[in-house]
Amino acid sequence: MENTPLSPQQEAQNGLTHFKAGDFNTAKDDFLRAIDGYNSMGDKLSLAEINNNLSTVYLKLGDAPSAWKVVVDTDIVFENAGDTRRQALALGNQAAVLEALGKSAQAVEKYETSADLLKKTGDRDNRAAVLQALSQLQLRMGRQLEAITSMQIALDNKPKLSLRERVLNKLLGISSRIFPH
């Protein structure tokens, strides 16, 4: 019995399923097959989307150079299509890769642009995640005041805070009254 090849959409869905299960090598293989399919179809938007997913897999596998190769310029594909939300998410993925590559200043720029675009689209959840990543990077860079500001904005964008986040938000509120910026 011959196996029928899966569609790129099915391969992509399998990749997401394997990614969520923590099976990153299988997810990578699924995404690569989806990329082949989308390439042959000429579907640039789906191809850019899968490349963003694949970059996240490569980061999980500790391969930042490969992650950069597949995610670079995906934001431009979405920008040209007028898809601001996915453009912003692509910039966030690029920032994470740049951070993994040790290019902190470039990562900060990408995170900031991503957060600004997500604000325009009203995507508060993803904006909060990007700002939290930005805050953590700023903290590692010794930019504490910027990190505090980024984290405050991130927490303000989250519709529901965990206990830890509520305590952090309270502490940040106290610190901003003591040290206004």
Image: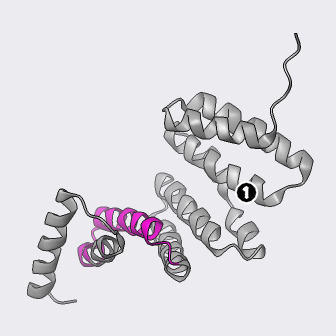
Question: Does the image show residue 70?
Answer: no
Name above or below for residue 150 compared with residue 167.
below
Q: Is residue 178 left or right of residue 21?
A: left
Of 108 and 55, nearer the camera is 55
SS at badge 1: helix
The residue stretch that appears in magenta: 122-148
Name which residue lies at 32% across and 62% down.
Answer: 136
Looking at the rendered structure, the kind of residue marked 1 is: Ala
Residue drawn at x 51%, y 53% is 101
136 and 129: which is toward the camera: 129
- For the stretch drawn in magenta, what is the main secondary structure? helix
Q: Position of residue 164 (x, y in %)?
A: 18, 58
* Left or right: 121, with 131 as reference point: right
Give the x, y percent position of residue 32.
73, 38
Number of labelled discs?
A: 1
Q: Residue tagged by mark 1? A: 48
Asked if residue 171 lies in the magenta stretch, the reply is no
Would you say 33 lies left or right of 143 here? right
Q: 119 or 131, which is in the foreground?
A: 119
Query: Which residue is more in the foreground, 2 or 143?
Result: 2
Q: Residue at x 86, y 24 (%)?
A: 4
From the viewer's perspective, is residue 69 above or below residue 123?
above
Q: Position of residue 131 (x, y in %)?
A: 39, 69
Q: Residue furthest top?
A: 1
Q: Is residue 95 visible?
A: yes
Dividing the image into 4 quarters, which one contains the N terminus? top right
- Going by the image, does 140 lie left or right of 180? right
The image quadrant that residue 149 belongs to is: bottom left
